[in-house]
Image: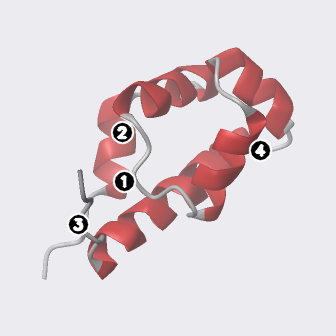
Amino acid sequence: MVRTPLTPEERERGERLGRLLRAARGDRSMTVVAAEAGVSAETLRKIETGRAPTPAFFTVAALARALGLSMDELAGLCALAPV
């Protein structure tokens, strides 16, 4: 299976998600939040830095739950701004 390249907009949305998760994490360590979400600290690091711009739905849901964010709120904040 060949994966199609991401568009600049999709990459920006992934970077926006990473910034939002990082801000929501605040002073909490990456290791603690990742453990609470059941993902590796490396996975969280990749998402926060934009190196994994399209994480799996259940990964995002677990991180949102660990950070006290609703999926609706997170989706709204990550949505592309209308042109």
The residue drawn where x is 86% and y is 42% is 27
Rendered image quadrant of residue 35: top right
Instruction: Name the residue beneath numbered marker 3.
Output: 4
Residue type for callout 3: Thr
Q: CA distance from mark 1 to mark 2?
A: 6 Å
For marks 2 and 3, the one nearer the N-term is 3
Rendered image quadrant of residue 28: top right
Label 3: which secondary element: loop
Q: Which mark is residue 73?
A: 2
Residue 75 percent location from the top left of the image = 31, 44
Instruction: Name the residue beneath numbered marker 4.
Output: 26
Residue type for callout 1: Leu
Q: CA distance from mark 4 to mark 1?
A: 17 Å
Instruction: Name the residue beneath numbered marker 1.
Output: 77
Q: Is residue 82 above or below residue 17?
A: below
Q: Which mark is residue 63?
A: none
Residue type for callout 4: Gly
